[in-house]
Image: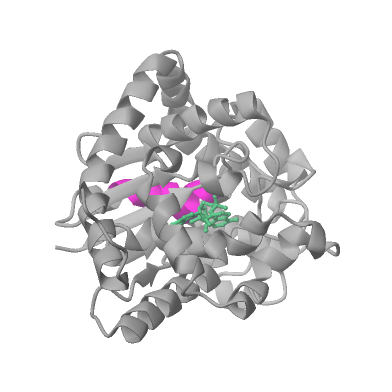
Amino acid sequence: TPRILSGIQPSGGLTLGNYLGALKRFATFQDTEAETIYCIVDLHAITVWQDPAVLATRTREAAAAFMAAGVDPAKSVLFNQSQVSAHAELAWLFNTVARVGWMYRMTQFKDKAGKNSENASLGLLAYPALMAADILAYQATAVPVGEDQKQHLELTRDIAAKFNHDYGVEHFPITEPLIEGVATRVMSLRDGSKKMSKSDPSDASRINLTDDADAISQKIRKARTDADPLPGTMAGLKDRPEARNLVNIYAALSDETPDQVLSRFEGQGFGSFKPALAEVAVAALEPITRRMTDYLADPAEIDRILGRGADQADEIAAPILAKTKDIMGLLRSR
Ligand code: TYM
């Protein structure tokens, strides 16, 4: 059976980009024959400084967001990465398989390390080996993510292939990325050339899953656009990235195609489109925010759920890790 795995960093509040690109899709795989494993990747988050008390809170918030978006701990394995030691162990083994040059080529490393990359944590450079470990510790076959994770998933495939080749085995699967839909790259509301991100200094650039109806409406009203009327199809939005982004968001939220959305707004301006978008966004997000708040009222229950998920994850990963050690000649005598 196919095994689906994905992860989200608890490094900040989750955004509409995380929701449409990833979270919203996670629940849909639960109702297929696939086995679903979802992970809050706290070990990835600490590759840049995290305040310890805030990190714990953000981890519970992320767990609440998964469940509010429909991930059911009775159907999926849901846990935080640091509770399952196979991730860190396998990541070390992959550090010996992956090449330094592969890591320096990662655009996310270049972006996050900035100009003074010598001063970045070693973990930030090795980040993709840990991500490969998240996936391959379960021999996962498919990984739903947004467009920005494509390069990391290619590296995961490279690590699996090099391991299999170096040790002459067919041990790790070559994982398929699942980058699908119209919201694989939700852009900033302030700048149509930048992706919407939890780390953008401007809060107006993103919609947070914790924003209330007023905040959502206001951010959409202030979103940067042009002054032209909307065309009848997406082909007419070629050179209008901000307009394209808003139409894509509308379509993803309402489960329509962008052309279906545009067919209703042809000839109209943003004065009528933005309030309609705000209405769709509030209707879609308000129940999620409410469910998140409900879950967060009982943090001990969240911790129990993550603990049970970690036990289940351990059971799947432990024999795969043991087999990996055997293949590599790492002696196991207990
Ligand atoms: P992270 O935490 O940055 O983002 C979580 C998920 O949200 C998607 N995403 C977006 N999708 C569309 N538009 C956007 N503006 C947008 N911003 C974020 C991301 O593509 C991702 O799917 N390295 C990963 C976490 C990770 C992981 C894994 C993912 C660690 N191990 C194993 C899959 C499998 C990351 O930093 O995602």
Rendering quarter of residue 6? bottom left
Instruction: Please state the horizontal and vertical placement of residue 124, each as a whole percent of the image.
Output: 65, 57
Pick the residue in front: 283 or 150.
Answer: 150
Count up the numbered dots.
Answer: 0
* Range drawn in magenta: 18-27
Residue at 67% of width from left, 74% of height from top?
Answer: 104
Pick the residue in front: 334 or 118.
Answer: 334
Instruction: Please state the horizontal and vertical placement of residue 325, each as a whole percent of the image.
Output: 30, 63
Identify the image's colour scheme: rainbow, by chain, secondary structure or one colour.
one colour
User: From what the image shows, is residue 313 above or below residue 3?
Assistant: above
Q: Is residue 110 left or right of residue 235?
A: right
User: From what the image shows, is residue 258 above or below residue 197?
Assistant: below
Residue at 48% of width from left, 28% of height from top?
Answer: 60
Residue at 73% of width from left, 67% of height from top?
Answer: 110
Q: Is residue 294 visible to us here?
A: yes
Q: Is residue 222 left or right of residue 330?
A: right
Q: What secondary structure is the stretch in magenta mostly built from?
A: helix
Instruction: Please state the horizontal and vertical placement of residue 13, each as a whole percent of the image.
Output: 60, 36
Pick the residue in front: 293 or 329.
Answer: 329
Instruction: Please state the horizontal and vertical placement of residue 331, each as a whole percent of the image.
Output: 28, 61
Pick the residue in front: 241 or 54.
Answer: 54
Q: Quadrant of the N terminus?
A: bottom left
Q: Is residue 131 visible to us here?
A: no
User: From what the image shows, is residue 294 above or below residue 157?
Assistant: above
Q: Is residue 104 left or right of residue 288?
A: right
Q: Is residue 145 magenta?
A: no
Residue at 43% of width from left, 33% of height from top?
Answer: 63
